[in-house]
Amino acid sequence: MAEKPVLTLYNTLTRSKEPFAPIDPDNVRMYVCGPTVYDFAHIGNARPVIVFDVLFRLLRHVYGEDHVTYARNITDVDDKINARALRDFGKEIEGGALSLNEAIRRVTEKTANQFHADIAALGAMQPTHEPRATEFVQPRGDGKVDMITLIERLIERGHAYQAGGEVLFDTQSMADYGQLSKRNLDEQQAGARVAVDAHKKNPGDFVLWKLSSPEEPGWESPWGRGRPGWHIECSAMSAAYLGETFDIHGGGLDLIFPHHENEIAQSRCAHGTPVMSNVWMHNGFLQVEGRKMSKSEGNFFTISELLHEEKFGGRTWPGEVLRLAMLMTHYREPIDFSVKRLEEALAALNRWERIAREESAEPTEPDAKFLALLADDLSTPDAIARIHELMNFGRWADSSAPKEHQKGSFGFGDGFSGFESANDRRSGVGAALACLEFLGLKVVRDELADDLKQGVEAIIQMRLELLKAKNFAEADKIRDDLAEKGIQLKDGKDPGTGERVTTWEVRR
RNA sequence: GGCCUCGUGGCGGAGUGGUUACGCAGAGGACUGCAAAUCCUUGCACCCGAGUUCGAUUCUCGGCGAGGCCUCCA
């Protein structure tokens, strides 16, 4: 393997790119805010999943597969979920047939399973840990950090107070609150439309625990039966799996404030630490066809709809196409998800697959230049440009070469347009394939089953006979029929004999 | 009102104080019965203004424009 690249990452905390230095190179730790599973995940949810999956792969490459811990939570504590659990399983809970956690689990099971299926189709690896909020509300048997214990500690240390049936974080108790979002709470007041709750010491104070009415779901706690505030779960679960301070914390940039800001406040004040995570990374937002995605705009798409239903651009889109389309834009830039973009990603994958098959290439090792580009704050657009370069290596004619050498179709023999040896070309393609694999992109699809394959070959033979008889109408009909079934025929000539050769491929 | 991003050719997307990637699409050509694929050639840009400079797309300031956050949100 080539030399390990030096990682540089943009840190929201400092608003600059910095060389990455893990606390412990033997255990690099990353936490990413996962989805709230009250409904199917939309394509916007896919972005951080894909972006941080690439980072996970890169970290594993640099520090070793067993030396990276990646935790991504599943938020299954949420009033919308609670309401559904109560609505759908209220009687069972009342009758004692079902505990509240079990009811919530039932509600979230379907969406969580769907989420896993969706992101698997997008080529995302499973994180090392995928904790659920419901399992970290109350003190645990295994002694891992839980939310209630964390809140108790905040009260003890004078960072939280009880008021109006809530436990609130006292923002004033933290001298440097607001570092991440660069917000000054006093200046924030001017245009804020936050209703100032009378029981809060300061308007910026946020809920750690709130009491539930008898009909509302809740957990027993020292402050009565209630449920946790939104931010505390990530403080608990990151500490549980990654420790009080860790290396990288990621999520969408909409989470910078208040979610991440408040996570930092809770964690640092509870643990008495100067930092929660050394690096904070945030992916940009996604628009669909130039507009903010929303149900009312009619441009709202779930991952599943894009994968399986012909709702966007009149066709389904394979996971690798969605993934490549996502990686064509740098993770911090806004991305406009459009049909045109998906078509471009599709065309690139098709071309690469064709080249890989022509060269009979297998993935070798990712190229050093590619890795260096990725290591530079995940410059996936540059990395993809490098893949293009590797794929095209030796395929283009030297423009100074004699005209007759430039003629002809590359696909049907060496020596027409390629001026590198076939071996050189193959090694370029092999490296390119390894790079694609590194990005989690599968380019060469599985072959069709033998019987199907033989069927297609037989039809092609029939068609070749028709062509020999100059029966173009019948031959073209066969080609159209196959096209409708997703089989694309390509006629060419054998460079030696001049005889017609028909190749075919399955449409993506 | 406060805070944060960002403005490069038809689109995506790099990069540089002076010779401007790459991909897609387009145009022309080769090949071809026609497609598809492949190959060759090729047009097209650096939001506006001022400043710094021998010289700015690249640096500084101002303006204009787009987006995000401040309320649940990737």
Image (tube, coloured by chain):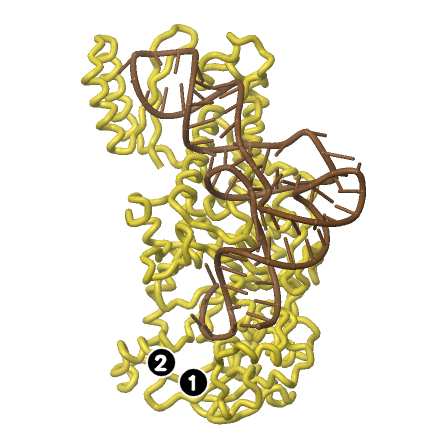
Chain colours: A yellow, B brown
Please state the chain letter of the residue tagged with numbered disc 2 in the rendered image: A
Instruction: Tell whether label 2 touches label 1 (CB within 8 Å).
Output: yes
Mark 2, residue position = A100
Kind of residue indicated by mark 1: Trp
Position of the C terminus of chain A, as image quadrant, is top left
Taking depth in this image into account, of A138 and A76 the one nearest to the observer is A76
Q: Quadrant of residue A81?
A: bottom left
Mark positioned earlier in the residue sequence (1 or 2): 2
Please state the chain letter of the residue tagged with numbered disc 1 in the rendered image: A
Task: Give residue A291's position: percent from left, percent from top.
Answer: 41, 55
Taking depth in this image into account, of A123 and A264 the one nearest to the observer is A264
Q: Residues within 10 Å of mark 1 (few under 14, many from 20)?
A: some
Q: Secondary structure at mark 2?
A: helix
Task: Give residue A255's position: percent from left, percent from top.
Answer: 52, 67
Q: Secondary structure at mark 1?
A: loop
Horizontal side, residue A339 vs residue A142: left or right: left
Q: Residues within 10 Å of mark 2 (few under 14, many from 20)?
A: many
User: In the rendered image, is residue A239 in sight?
Assistant: no
Residue at 46% of width from left, 14% of height from top? A413
Position of the N terminus of chain A, as image quadrant, is top right
In the rendered structure, find residue A219 and report the number of the disc placed on it: 1
In the rendered structure, find residue A348 and report the number of the disc placed on it: none
Classify A424 as above or below B21.
Answer: above
